[in-house]
Image (cartoon, rainbow, N blue to C red):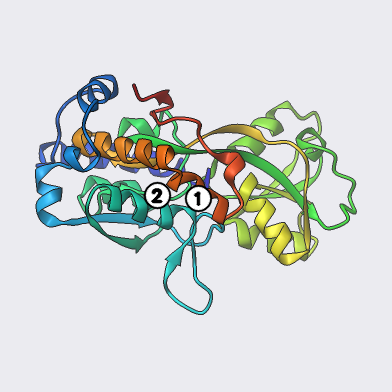
Amino acid sequence: MTKRLYAAVAAVLIVTALAGGCGRSSSGTDAAQGAAAAKGKTAKDLVPADVRERGVLRLATAEGYPPMEMYKEGTQELTGVDPDLGAAIAAKLGLKSTISNAAFDGLIPGLQSDRWDLVLSSMSDTEERRAAVDFVDYFNAGGAVMVKKGNPEGVKDLADLCGRTVVLAKGSSNLAIGEKQNDKCDKKMTIMQSEDAPTGLLSIDSGRAVATIVDSPVAAMYAEETGKYEVLPGQYDAGPWGIAIDRRDTALRDAVAKAMQELIADGGYKKILDTYGVAANAVPEVMVNTKPWK
C-alpha cells in the first residue's frame, strides 16, 4: 500500500549491509549523471549487458490491491496498473518479462538478493526506503478515508476520526497517517490493525470500526465495485509511488527511467492508466527519487 510496510525498512537495511559485496550491474552514477548520459540513447540502448544477455526482466509485486495489482477473475494471471506497466517497460527494453507475487515486506529484500530486477507494487517513494533502493516514480496518490455507505456515523474528515475506532493496515503509510492524526487528537482514536485493506473493510462491515484509510485510487475502486462504502473527499499525505530498483543497479535504473520517458511520450503510459481509470494519478514527467530525471 502507499501502500504498506515501513516495518520492512529495518530488515532491508540489514540485507543491504550483508549484500554489499554481491555482484550487481551498476554504473555507479547518480540520477542526474545517468540522465545526462542517456541523452540521445533509447531505453533499449541502456539495458545492462547481464540483463540483455538473460533476455528477461524479472518483476515482482504483492497482489491484492486493485486496480494496481490483482488477479484476472477466475485465474492466477496478474493484471492491473503495475503488472501492465512492468510489461510495457520490458517491451521498451527489448526484453521479455516475468512477474512474481510475493509478500509486500519481502519485496525489497528480494531485490537485494537478486531474486528480481524491479518491484512494482504501489510502493511509496520514501527517504527510508531509498537507503536500499532507487525509485523511478510513476504514480501520485494519498490516503482517503472510507466509511460505510451512507456514512451512518457522520464522519466528515480525517480530524473527525478522533475519539472513534478505526482500522488501518499494519505497517502501511495509511497507518502512519492515522497515527500522526491521533497524536493531535484530544480524545484518542482506538486503532485496530488489519493485515491489509480488504480485511480492514470487514471490520467496517461488522461495525467493529467506523472508518479506515486506503490509498485513494484503491478506495475508489472498492467503493464502486462493492457498493458498500463511501470515500470522503480529500487525500492525505499524497506523494509519489515508485518502481523500486536496487541502489547498486544504477544502469538498470536509468534504462527504466528512459523506458518511462518513452512511454509518456508515445502515450503508452496514459493508455495503461486510462484502462484502470486512474489517469488523474499520473506523473507529468519522469522522476527518480522524487526529483525530475534530467
Could one spot residue 175 in this view of the protein?
no
Discs 2/1, front: 1
In depth, the one of 171 and 261 nearer the eye is 261
In this rendering, position of residue 77 left or right of residue 94:
right
Label disc, if present, on residue 120 of the rendered structure:
2
Q: Is residue 203 above or below residue 118?
A: below
Q: Residue at x 15, y 36 (%)?
A: 20
Q: Residue at x 33, y 46 (%)?
A: 108
In depth, the one of 111 and 53 nearer the eye is 53
Q: Sequence order check: which comes first, mark 2 or mark 1?
A: 2
Quadrant assignment for the C terminus: top left
In this rendering, position of residue 143 left or right of residue 133:
right
Type of the residue with mark 1: Lys
Q: Position of residue 288 (x, y in %)?
A: 37, 29
In this rendering, position of residue 207 left or right of residue 274:
right
Q: Is residue 218 above or below residue 37?
A: below
Could one spot residue 274 in this view of the protein?
yes
